[in-house]
Amino acid sequence: MRYIAGRPARRWLNLSAPGDAFSHGFLPNMIETDQLTRCYGNLTAVDALSMRVEPGQVLGLLGPNGAGKSTAMRMIAGFLVPTSGTARVCGYDVLREPLQAKRALGYLPEGAPSYGELTVREFLQFIVRMRGFRPDVGFRRFDEVVHRLQLEEVLGLCIDTLSKGLRRRVGLAQAILHDPPVLMLDEPTDGLDPNQKHAVRQLIDVMARERTILISTHLLEEVHALCNRVVIIARGKLMADATPAELEQRSRYHGAVSFSAPGSGMSQEMLGRLPQVAAIEVDPLDGRITVFPKPGERILEPVEQLLRQQGLEVSEIQLERGRLDEVFRQITTDGNGQHHVMSGERA
Amino acid sequence: MSPQSAVMRRELRSYFVTPVAYVFLVIFLVLAGILTFYAGDFYERGQADLQPFFMMHPWLYLILVPALTMRMWAEETRGGTLELLLTLPITLWQAMLGKFLAAWLFIGLALVLTFPIWITVNYLGSPDNGVILAGYLGSWLMAGTFIAIGACLSALTRSQVVAFILTALVCVLLILAGHPQVLDFFQGALPRKLVNGVAHLSMLRHFEAISRGVLDVRDLLYFLLSTLGWLLAGVLLLDLKRTR
């Protein structure tokens, strides 16, 4: 469980604004978008998107490529100006109080861009200066972040010469250098190998203990690994806003039971006669049998009982939680299975 | 430390870790020397001043400053670092100013490194060092205007080549605006008052005045205001990019 109401968030808020609404124990939404819209010519990349990220949450912004995830994040980060609507970070409006909003936010842009000709040390020192720290505080933050992301050994190397995974770590270091209460990461594991992905996820997991995170991805495994809430967008529109478990419940597979048993033709018929069973499917490749329940029914026990009665040898039997990829497809495609993909994401 | 000085330091650092700085300094110093002695008749004039040296500067800047400024914003746009820079707590104006100051200080360094020619002229004769100082000041101010033009046009495009060509084009127009041939060209098409206006836009005219040692407020204002104007235009262009 990561529902701790962000401790550093409170610390930061008290520090920055004593005596205003924040210090009376009222915590604003960490990120809030209000009818956020962005058009490129005739193309509506983000369409009246309203969502909230509450303190302590790790929200996964999910969507197919080109759904408008990056555009939405760029507007929240203050890089792009919304066509209409607005966004707030820690209560600061990105249009009216852009500097305060940017100070409250740590942002890792897509692909973790950085000045490749600089060394890691020079780059992070540049960020320290940009964040306007007093020298002593700046040094401390620098050391802390370098230690945290284990960058000690590459400090003197040019960023251009680093591997993708290391470069991503430098980008993360940049994003958390000022200890922001809100972190926004645009596809932080995209293009990394499985080991690097694992390492970055672990880092995010640790960081999530003390701050609010908005993370965009098109990888469903990431949602299981990291997020406690999911927002799915397609064609710039909000399609779903739920916990991963709730999404799994929407799956046809939620509560289904699957097993492998050789020579079970006869038992299939028997299974079909169970009052709780809605349908049975057999995988044409490996012969695995999946039994779907009628809505609201639990079928693990009756199925097991039946199999025992039949005297069938079942090597393992599994209760399905639901398949996110299926729900994702269902939500982000229309009836014809046509993807809601726009013509290329604008850089 | 203010964000604009952080940007300035980073920019200067980038000049020196890439060969840009060294290539620029070497070519600037070599060309300044060659042009002064061969094209400028430094010896044959028989005068102890640096007029031939300063008169070469507009033409040196014409080639070298666009090369220095073309990457300023174009590269940030292309490399995606613009997104990083503009999501840090900095205003567009501070970012622009930081980048401008870096390039301007760098040209200042190049000018300081031309000191051997100053020593030479002092060794050979007894020049009016006040006039020479004014010449350096005028040259530096003029460089500032060139840089501001380059900064603005670099914000216009993500292609460095386009930025280079546009900057060189605008600069050559501004240098030549006061030239009789250019003015003759406008004479037929424009009323007299506008032709005079064009002549006043001429960078060469204002620069010559300063480098002769005549420090007129109007000449100084010309450079300062046009520098500020181009920088502001660049900021507006960047802002437009975020909206478009």
Image (cartoon, coloured by chain):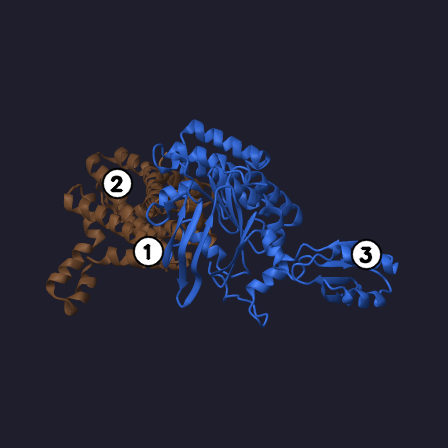
Chain colours: A blue, B brown
**Snapshot quadrant of residue B233:** bottom left
Callout in the foreground (2, 3) = 3
Q: Which residue is mark 1?
A: B237
**Of residues A295 and A327, the one drawn nearer to the viewer in this rendering:** A295
Distance in Å between CA atoms under marks 2 and 1: 31 Å
Q: Which residue is mark 2?
A: B136
Neighbourhood count class around disc 1 (C-alpha, 10 Å): few under 14, some 14–19, many 20 upward: some
The image quadrant where one finds the N terminus of chain B is top left
* Location of residue B158 in the rendering, given as x and y in whole percent from the top left corner: 41, 57
Above or below — where is B168 with respect to B138? below
Amino acid on which disc 1 is placed: Leu
Q: Which residue is mark 3?
A: A305
**Disc marking residue A15:** none
Distance in Å between CA atoms under marks 2 and 3: 97 Å
Q: Are marks 3 and 1 on the same chain?
A: no
Above or below — where is B48 with respect to B83? above
Callout in the foreground (2, 1) = 1
Amino acid on which disc 3 is placed: Gln
**Of residues B125 and A290, the one drawn nearer to the viewer in this rendering:** A290
**Of residues A262 and A81, the one drawn nearer to the viewer in this rendering:** A262
Q: Residue furthest top?
A: A136
* Location of residue A44 in the rendering, given as x and y in whole percent from the top left corner: 43, 64
Distance in Å between CA atoms under marks 3 and 1: 73 Å
Identified at 27% across, 43% down, the residue is B140
Q: Secondary structure at mark 3?
A: helix
Identified at 34% across, 54% down, the residue is B239
Q: Is residue A72 left or right of residue A255?
A: left
Residue B43 visible? The answer is no
